[in-house]
Image: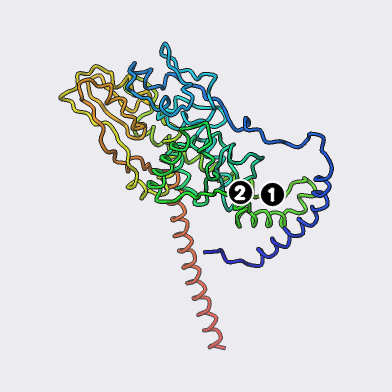
Amino acid sequence: MAEKRDFLDELIDLQSDWRSLKELPSSMVGSLVDEGGDQKVFNPADYKEKPFANSGRCLRVASGRADACSRCFDVCPTHAITIHNRSVAVGEDCRKCGLCTAVCPTETLTTRRHTPRQVYDQIARAASAYERCYVTCTRAIKRLPKGNEVVLGCVGSISRDMWFSLMADYDNISVYLPVGICDRCRTTTGEQTYTDAIAEAEQWADAALGLEVDDADLTHDFTRAYKRSQFVSGALHSAERLVTRTTPALAGAKAVAKKISDHTQRLNRLQKEIEGAVGARTTGNHLRVLTQGRKLMMGALQHNEDLAARIELSVPTWDPTRCTMCGDCARTCTTHALDLSRDGKVTIQSAYCVSCGACATACEEGALSMGPMDVSELVVPDRAAEELARKKAEAKQQASRYLETGKKQLNRVADALEKLDDDA
């Protein structure tokens, strides 16, 4: 349902029309005069980045077994990833598509400018400020992107967990890929990767991701809330702008930045709550690793707990009658979700488990097997938010009591005045 317009919306439209007319002469001059190379040009290399490896997180390296995991090998279109002498390397024939970073469960492969958190924040900014946010690739757009277009080496570089987080938090995200663009792409495994990830994320989030195939159908309008924030800021702080040379556009940008900052703080509180509940280290003093993808997923579940029932994940279960306490499972688990205590007891912390199944593969005795995870365990209460809500409720009750007391006092004064009037 369209939002009801008011007088402020009419003023915003008038301001936009006037600004367009005022800027028309300069735009015409800019189209006729050569800027001498000052204009920025589209370069696909600006949106791609070769991943690097943290070999200590690799399941194959930790277990010494080729069957522990092969996801990056299977998805790489050029077979650029190799493991030699317990070290993971990415060759020079890498296409910088980022598919390996999306499928690696332990985030062994990553980049500096396109980490899961950075990509999430980039998409979230666009989705917060614009009516529609588009995720696309360099081959699809072939021009400088607009403010609401997020360009990646391949759409498949976004993992299933991140798609779920984005769809759970925003309902205005679409993928822009012209018809047949993936058929002619040399990243031959990209289409299957993103279709599988999006399909599962849509099922988990109970939502549908938009799809656009024609550049003419893309819209680039700011959201109503964003435009109103800019307009109100400009009306209230016009005098300040004369002194500081600030612009009303900063108000909308600050509002979006605050939203992203609040999300980051919420995720940081979430990790602290988990560490406080289960401990940040194992009994062997290994630091547990909460992957960025898992943290984003859990962050989305905090304010929509009902989605936990739709998510299907697996977790290892332990059979003590078969366990020989060899420790292969604990050595294989590079996120240290699995802990083998000194007395021979195996425990698994679901928040840190990435459902890779490598520990079960490494167990020769069959003491570990993968079974359904109770995803509701990933819903961690935000104590800070609960405390804030409690204080707000108490303040509301106190204000109500003060209001009721004031009403009673006013009634007594009115009764006294009425009695004086009768006596007179």
Residue at 43%, 43% (x, y): give it.
Answer: 198
- 375 vs 413, nearest the viewer: 375
Residue at 70%, 63% (x, y): give it.
Answer: 11
Quadrant hosting residue 279 = top left
Quadrant hosting residue 300 = top left
- 424 vs 122, nearest the viewer: 122
Q: In this view, does 235 lie to the left or right of 357?
A: right
Report how many numbered discs are placed on residues in the image. 2
Q: Residues within 10 Å of mark 2 (few under 14, many from 20)?
A: few
Residue at 63%, 53% (x, y): give it.
Answer: 221
Q: In this view, does 26 lie to the left or right of 158?
A: right
Which residue matches tag 2? 215
Please say if 195 is above or below 249: above
Please identify the quadrant where the C terminus is shown: bottom right
Which residue matches tag 1? 249
Q: Residue 224: which numbered mark, if any?
A: none
Please say if 323 is above or below 403: above
- Residue closest to the far left: 321
Amino acid type at circle 2 is Asp
**Residue 126: horizontal and vertical position, in percent?**
58, 46
**Residue 194: horizontal and vertical position, in percent?**
46, 39
**Residue 374: horizontal and vertical position, in percent?**
29, 41
